[in-house]
Amino acid sequence: MAERKARADALRNRETVLAAADELFARSESPRSVSMDEIAAAAGVGKGTLFRRFGDRTGLIRAVFEARIEPLRHAVEAGPAPLGPSAPPRERVPALLDAVLCFKLDNRHLSLALEEAGSGSPYQAAHYAWWHGILRDLLEQMRDAADGTADGPAAGTAAGPAPESDFAAHALLAATRADLVEHLAGQEGMDRERIRAQLAVFVGTVLGQE
């Protein structure tokens, strides 16, 4: 009973810390400007608790990011079309990338701070590997379907072979990187719908038009 209560208290404290950090990050110019002292004070815990549970500020930023994106990941894993697994790959790939882009637009500073956190290559991050794997598998399914229905591209329907799936998944995700989103929405002043429309055109070009 005591062990169960301790686990419940730890989970509750973690949620309190994440909520406090999320609120401070949202109010700041950048999550990187928020100190661990400020977060600890807002959550009502000792700073040592933050370092033990999250490692450092980058770990805490990552934890908040993962908590924010969890509903989207759940929709991809188990939700309805067009994000969920019941959607055909050609419909699902553009929907997934549009959802990632919208998430980055809605969480610009948090996403950018995580990419710029200096914790190694962003391509090694667990969340990046997950998205890349989903897209790579969908692109493979599209290629397998194409290979199974014809000996090759029909004349006039494609410019050539589809890009190799692993590379193509990287290239598609690169169009949703937080630093690019920040540049387009900030420096270039593009509005949300224009960025989404441009991404849709790019994705359609990579996938090929039917």
Image (cartoon, helix red, strand yellow):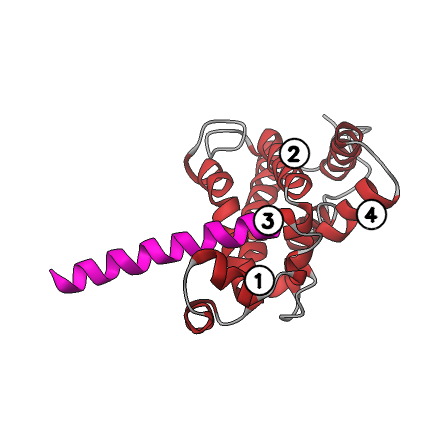
Magenta region: which residues?
A: 1-26
Amino acid under disc 3: Arg
Distance of label 4 from label 1 (alpha carbons): 22 Å
Tell me the tag on residue 94: 2
Q: Could you tell me the amino acid type at mark 4?
A: His
Which of the two discs, 4 and 3, labels the residue nearer the N terminus?
A: 3
Q: Residue at x 71, y 50 (%)?
A: 178
Q: Nearer the viewer, mark 1 or mark 3?
A: 1
Identify the residue position indicated by label 3 in the image. Answer: 136
| Residue 91 coordinates in the image, percent (x, y) | 60, 29
Mark 3 surroundings within 10 Å by alpha-carbon count, few (fewer than 14), some (14 through 19), many (20 or more) = many
Of the 4 image quadrants, the one containing the C terminus is: top right
Q: CA distance from mark 3 to mark 2?
A: 13 Å
Q: Position of residue 27 (x, y in %)?
A: 63, 47
Side (left or right) of 9 relative to 177: left
The residue depicted at 33 percent of the width and 53 percent of the height is 12
**Magenta span main SS:** helix
Foreground pick, 31 / 101 = 31
Q: Where residue 125 is drawn, which disc sits there?
A: 1
